[in-house]
Image (spheres, rainbow, N blue to C red):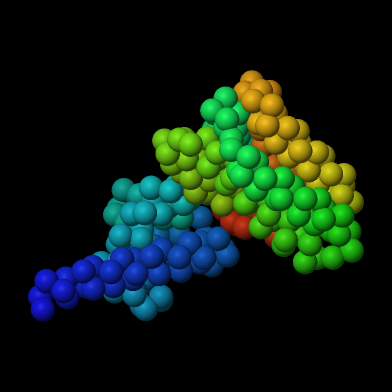
Amino acid sequence: MATAGAPLAEDRAVSQTVRAELMLRDLILAGEIRPGERLAELAIVERIGVSRTPVRAALMKLAEEGLLEAIPSGGYAARAFGEREVLDAIELRGTLEGLAARLAAERGASSTALDRLRDLLARLDEAVARIAASEDAFTLYIDLNAAFHREITRLAASRVVERQIERAMSLPFASPSAFVRAQSESPEAGRILILAQDQHHCIVDAITRREGARAEALMREHSRLAGRNLAMALRSRAALARVPGAALIQIRTE
């Protein structure tokens, strides 16, 4: 009985750690924990109703991701990010995704894999066509866009590259769709999304033709649209409010 119970206890511990991690991340991204605010373990235990050990593990995990930082007096505090750091995170993600696209092209994707990409492209085309008339289309586009980027990473067939991309995207504003919803506040939204979708098509074409250098260059250029969207969001308080984790971004006042 003891042997059978051990895995169950371990699974419960993992489940509690994941729960603590998700709840803490939500509090940070929602701005309920402000940048620089010290996170005391006992206070968090009371706040989210999870025991101390999983809370400690969750704090360590979020520190590894970069959302928290250790402070000299002990414990952790929520981090703040300057605009340059956000742009660097986007650039890093784009560089890694460019490598993934090149590997996908050079190693050759199966016809089944290419069909999945083309299916995503078709569904993205439909979402872009409906965005002007439907807020739900933005949500659909974000989901499909994330799926498209995951598929490119998967086609690289490199767990090493995949892990590094996952790490680069652990910060909320480094993900491919971080600033997409902010576009709904901009009159340029349709034009930018059409450009992004054209780049999607070109990336798939390059992978299909096994043009590695072209696929890499296109993917890196595509990622820079996020930097453009960041600049747009920072000019509009309403747009910035639609960005996950916006409370963590320090806006220059000069």
Q: Is residue 189 above or below residue 48?
A: above
Which of 28/102 is in front?
A: 102
Give the left or right position of residue 122, taking residue 245 as reference: right
Residue sitting nearer the eye, 21 or 191: 191
**In this orientation, which residue lies closer to the viewer: 117 or 37?**
117
Seen at 72% across and 61% down, the residue is 140
Question: In which quarter of the view is residue 108 placed?
Answer: top right
Q: Residue at 69% of width from left, 26% of height from top? A: 209
Q: Residue furthest top?
A: 213
Image position, residue 177 (x, y; %): 66, 50
| Position of residue 48 measured from the top left corner of the image (x, y, whole percent) | 41, 75
Residue 3: tell me if it is visible.
yes
Foreground residue, 170 or 115?
A: 115
Question: Is 13 on the left-hand or right-hand side of 154?
Answer: left
Question: 132 above or below 149?
Answer: below
Q: Is residue 74 above or below residue 169?
A: below
Residue displayed at 41% across by 54% down:
62
- How many dots with numbers? 0
- Residue 201: % across, % down: 76, 38
> What residue is shown at x 73% (from left), y 39% (from top)?
200
Spot the residue most to the front.
111
Q: Quadrant of residue 89?
A: top right
Furthest residue toward left? 2
- Give coordinates of residue 156: x percent, y percent: 52, 35
> Left or right of 82: which side holds 230?
right
Location of the C terminus (image quadrant): top right
Residue 164 seen in the current view = no
**In-image side of 158 versus 44 (left or right):** right
For the N terminus, which image quadrant? bottom left
Kindly indicate the quadrant of the structure image that contains residue 10.
bottom left
